Amino acid sequence: MQKNLHFQLITVILLHQIDVSCGFTSHYSPFISYGTNSFVQYAKKPKRSTSNGKGFGKPANGFGKGSVDPMKKTYDVSPTTLPLDMLQRTEMMKDFFASYDEWHPLFGSIAANDSVLASSHIDASLFTQEGLSFSEETPWEKLPQMPSGENKDSQMETVSLVLDSMQKALTDIPVSQDLYNTNPDDNNDMHFIEEGRRLLVLERFHVLQNEGDAHGDLFRVCWSEIHHLVTEGNTDKGSLIILEEYTSEIEENGGIEQFVDEKIRLPLQFLGLADSLEVAAFKRGKICIRLIHQLGAVPSLEDRDKEQSGFQ
């Protein structure tokens, strides 16, 4: 297994040397990630590398001003703002579903079943509805895969900036240079793979401008995206929601971590979807919320080869 992980690690390194992050503002050509079930679209055509051949790892002069600690995980993060007591959480969800009653049709349409914890707060008929209606009157909406409209160019530049930062954080992880490294205490390789594969599954990108109801806009985009990911039903699919500016309105409401815990993670738990959707908030150039639907296990190369050869 260790050998397979190292092969996958090298594969991810090679993919990221293609410079995924700059592809949103220049030439577009999709490529398939070797060793995973997902792909990154709109990747830039390869350009001449400026690497000095010393591989990846922490730069000699540190991570630099404004950069992030690449060893800080954006996955396996436990909620930090929620009470441990389940009775308190239940009371929070009672208030949540009462406050967002106009969203009940969407919540009912994506709930895992009609007996989830949220069923005591949502009309039973909404769990059996066929499809969800979209109109100018509904608070949710169908969102494009990529930024569009009159602000498309500036928003694509923001996406590129964030992906540059994500790639930089990834390649700053000090990994083993030894393909057959068997040191059980070396967890950096696995950390690199876990962060890298979460980057590779991102296919949908949204940039929120600092206009109007920032808190409401963030809620709308997050839950519209959650509905899209759940109803499409595909595995290893992700969306990245980027805040152009970290608004005072969101800060006054407890910050991005509290928003994610109380407005997304806990409701997903009550809807029976906590194990299906991974939600993370972090800063990579800008404040981001990442949503991933049914992230699979790290595949081994033997499994991949068996599938390609027609063996089970």
Image (cartoon, grey):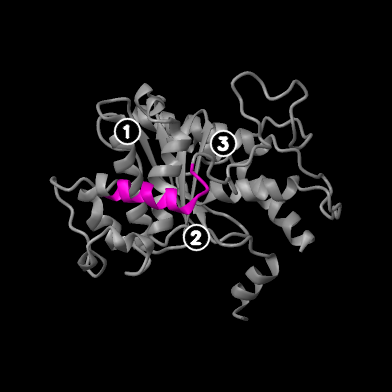
Q: Amino acid at mark 1?
A: His
Q: Quadrant of the N terminus?
A: bottom right
Dot 1 crowding, Cα within 10 Å, few <14, some 14–19, many 20+ = some
Q: Nearer the viewer, residue 162 or 114?
A: 114
Looking at the image, which residue sits at the far bottom? 311
> Which residue, given by chain and number where applicable, does mark 3 sit on?
166
Q: Amino acid at mark 2?
A: Asp
Dot 3 crowding, Cα within 10 Å, few <14, some 14–19, many 20+ = many
Where's residue 111, x and y in %? 34, 63
Q: How far, Cα to Cα, is label 2 from label 1?
A: 25 Å
> Which residue, given by chain and number where applicable, does mark 2 sit on?
275
Measuring 38% from the left and 56% from the top, which residue is drawn there?
A: 229
> Which residue, given by chain and number where applicable, does mark 1 sit on?
215
Q: How far, Cα to Cα, is label 2 from label 3?
A: 24 Å
Q: Indicate which disc, 2 or 1, sits on the residue closer to the N terminus.
A: 1
Circle 1 SS class: helix
Q: Nearer the viewer, residue 82 or 140?
A: 82
Report the mark closest to the observer, 2 or 3: 2
Q: Is residue 28 visible?
A: no
Please indicate whether residue 252 sits to the left or right of residue 130 in the image.
Answer: right
Where's residue 159, x and y in %? 44, 34
Q: Indicate which disc, 2 or 3, sits on the residue closer to the N terminus.
A: 3
Q: Look at the image and give the residue range highlighted in magenta.
A: 82-97
